[in-house]
Image (spheres, rainbow, N blue to C red):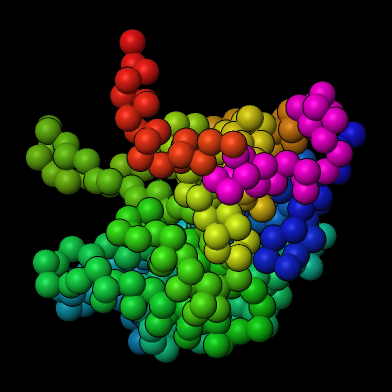
Amino acid sequence: MADLSAHYLGLSLQSPIVVSSCPLCRNIDDMLRMEAAGAGAVILPSLFEEQLEIEDLNLQYYLAHDRGSLPDALKHIPEMSEYNKGADGYLSLLYRAQQALQIPVIASLNGTSTGGWVRYAKLLEAAGAAALELNVYYMPTTSNVTGAQIEQRYLDLVQQVVGTVAIPVSIKLSPYFSATAHMALKLVEAGADGLVLFNRFYQPDIDLDTEMVTPNLQLSDSAELRLRLRWVAMLYGQVKVDMAITGGVHSAEDALKSLLAGANVAMVASTLLRNGIPHIRTIIDGMNQWMDEREYDSIGRIRGKLSQRRVSNPSAYERANYMQVLQSYR
Ligand SMILES: Cc1cc2nc3c(=O)[nH]c(=O)nc-3n(C[C@H](O)[C@H](O)[C@H](O)COP(=O)(O)O)c2cc1C
């Protein structure tokens, strides 16, 4: 059987299948089941900048009990402690999880601006996080913000977080940069140890009955993988950094494609919400079978094999491919 051990963010993992930040990772028994099914690491749900700032201001009580007495600007911020247990509960969950599990437990911070809230990174490190994933879910909605300002915002935040902790820090990125490869390079220069490609942006829907804009979370499918494969394949070897694919990994085939493109690990969330935690084992068994059939004895043999640098037709990832694809439609 092939050796599926993997390396990510300086951590040695039993497999390259990592459970990404989602509600399944807020329960220790479930995380133990992930470990038993073969997961290489788990990432806790995010703690949010807004939430941490509110906690600092002692506004938590008003959010829960007396929202009406808050200024309008704060009323729209949802109460998140049911989702991630709030800062205290989160630190306790993290501490207990890393005590109970053999595999690394990665914490997740979600924010968009530098500020006092970033000191929570230090607390997450102290509670035993093996690494920190920083999710910069930034939605630039006003016309007076430039691309350069947005990029600088990312870089400042990364620099501040990296300067706060000694554990590895990965950045969960948006696919919407005008120069993704350059931005990846700048993030690495700012101190990022890993890039997680890509955030899924949940688009609100419009309900025709109520004539309201409604939040609506749809799980992914494998079609979303291709954007990630393309970028990981193009960045592999060009930017010296660990890479994870999140978004559209549902099967052994998807995970293998992620590694062939050049990812260190393939992350899963939707497929576990749909098929249950034991599906991790199905993915790993399928990977093993494929690797055995082709006599690949380790992940190192396949990682990056189909990256842009190593394929015989590098244009497959570029503009020429677009013209070819259009022509190939029957
Ligand atoms: C219900 C749900 C909750 C999620 N919560 C978080 C979160 O707290 N922080 C985060 O960075 N990503 C979060 N994600 C995004 C996932 O970590 C993952 O990046 C995304 O779902 C794409 O992977 P998938 O195609 O395997 O689902 C969440 C996803 C789902 C479905």
Residue 222 spot, x, y in % from top left:
49, 32
| Residue 15 seen from this side | no
Out of 93 and 228, give the one closest to the viewer. Answer: 228
- Residue 263 sits inside the magenta stretch: no
Q: Quadrant of residue 27?
A: bottom right
Residue 30 percent coordinates (x, y)? 69, 48
* Looking at the image, residue 58 lies above or below residue 293: below
Residue 256, compared with residue 286, is above or below; it is: below
Specify the farthest residue to the right: 1
Query: For residue 70, what is the image quadrant?
Result: bottom left
Question: Is residue 301 part of the magenta span, yes or no?
Answer: yes
The answer, for residue 172, to whether it is visible in the render is yes
Q: Residue at x 26, y 76 (%)?
A: 149
Residue 91 falls left or right of residue 221: right
Q: Which residue is depicted at the point 74% across and 33% down?
A: 287
**Residue 280 on image: x %, y %:** 70, 38
Residue at point 37%, 26% (across, down): 324
How many discs appear?
0
Farthest residue in the top direction? 330
**Image quadrant where residue 58 sits:** bottom left
Q: Position of residue 74 (x, y in %)?
A: 23, 74
Q: Quadrant of the N terminus?
A: top right
Q: Quadrant of the C terminus?
A: top left
**Residue 113 vs residue 194: left or right?**
left
Q: In the rendered structure, which segment of residues is drawn in magenta? A: 288-311
Image: 241 above or below 290: below
Left or right of 44? Residue 128 is right
